Image: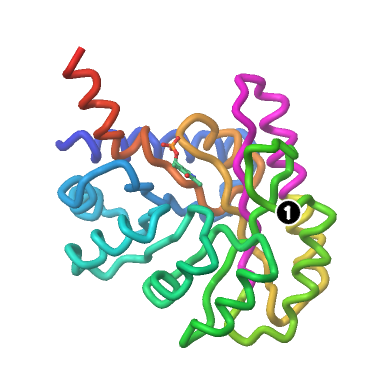
Amino acid sequence: MTKILTNLDKINSQIQTAQQRSNREATNVQIIAVTKEVSVERTQEAIDAGLIHLGENRPEGLKQKIEAIQANVHWHYIGSLQTRKVKQVINEIDYLHSLDRLSLAEEIEKRATKPVKCFVQVNVSGEQSKHGLTIDDAVTFIESLQNFTKIQVVGLMTMAPNTEDETIIRSVFKQLKQCQQQIAERGFAHAPCTELSMGMSNDFEIAVEEGATFVRVGTALVGNERGEQDEHEK
Ligand SMILES: *Cc1c(COP(=O)(O)O)cnc(C)c1O
């Protein structure tokens, strides 16, 4: 078995256990393999292991992988997206995880040739270094997208703060879930908002316990070739 298959088996069983712990067996959790730090070859290995959701965070990396890989997979753009780069990526991807401002929505409306599945990025913890709207602004922002024909708000996305404190991480995920439910209840045609993109290598089990439907896993799944390279050089 390749390393990725071994990692995937482990992650799948961790997800399952987390679902059982929290009585969320009915939730369908999709793994997005974050390939931003690895080569085309390693990305192909992830696809061969059965992964169909792939995440990139730069237009260049996305382009390189899409050109090299012909497989029928779903591409997720998980990084913050500069308005001037929208035209390079928006018609190449299946999901955008970083919708966080009106100017970005307007550019998508102008450039997209078909509706794009978007996650609105929320900065629950309020950390300065993180992108995203506050929880309060997210609701108003989503309301303001009603007349956009190319934007479908499928859910909310967040990144947990960089801390070892599980209580803080869990609280962030809980708040995102509450906000998602509040928006879903509004029944907007343009914003079904049923999905939650939360959880990375270090915190995906907590995210699954709190209701994640998409986890974005890089290091624990496909590794980080830059980091591994550094190890060799030591
Ligand atoms: C890099 C990245 C991930 C994956 O991080 P890991 O810790 O390697 O699993 C997930 N989400 C976003 C937005 C990222 O930039």
Between 73 and 98, the one lying in front of the other is: 98
The image quarter containing residue 152 is bottom right
Q: In this view, does 121 lie to the left or right of 199?
A: right
Residue 42 place in picture, x, y as percent = 20, 45
The image quarter containing residue 194 is bottom right
Identify whether 203 is placed above or below 136.
Answer: above
Which span of residues is magenta-colored? 153-176
Residue 110 place in picture, x, y as percent = 55, 84
Q: Which residue appears farthest toward the top when viewing the image? A: 234
Between 185 and 34, the one lying in front of the other is: 34
Identify whether 221 is placed above or below 119.
Answer: above
Residue displayed at 32% across by 40% down: 8
Circle 1: element type: loop
Q: Which residue appears farthest toward the front when viewing the image? A: 84
The amino acid at mark 1 is Leu
Residue picked out by circle 1: 133
Residue displayed at 54% across by 59% down: 97
Q: In this view, does 30 lie to the left or right of 54?
A: right
Identify whether 142 is placed above or below 122.
Answer: below
Q: Does the magenta stretch include residue 6?
A: no
Between 182 and 153, the one lying in front of the other is: 153
Identify whether 17 is placed above or below 188.
Answer: above
Number of numbered callouts drawn: 1
Q: Quadrant of the N terminus?
A: top left
Residue displayed at 73% across by 43% down: 124
Q: In this view, does 220 lie to the left or right of 95?
A: left
Between 116 and 60, the one lying in front of the other is: 60
Crowdedness near tag 1: few (<14), some (14–19) or many (≥20) residues, C-alpha within 10 Å: many
Residue displayed at 73% across by 53% down: 133
Q: In which quarter of the image is the C terminus?
A: top left
Residue 208 place in picture, x, y as percent = 57, 42
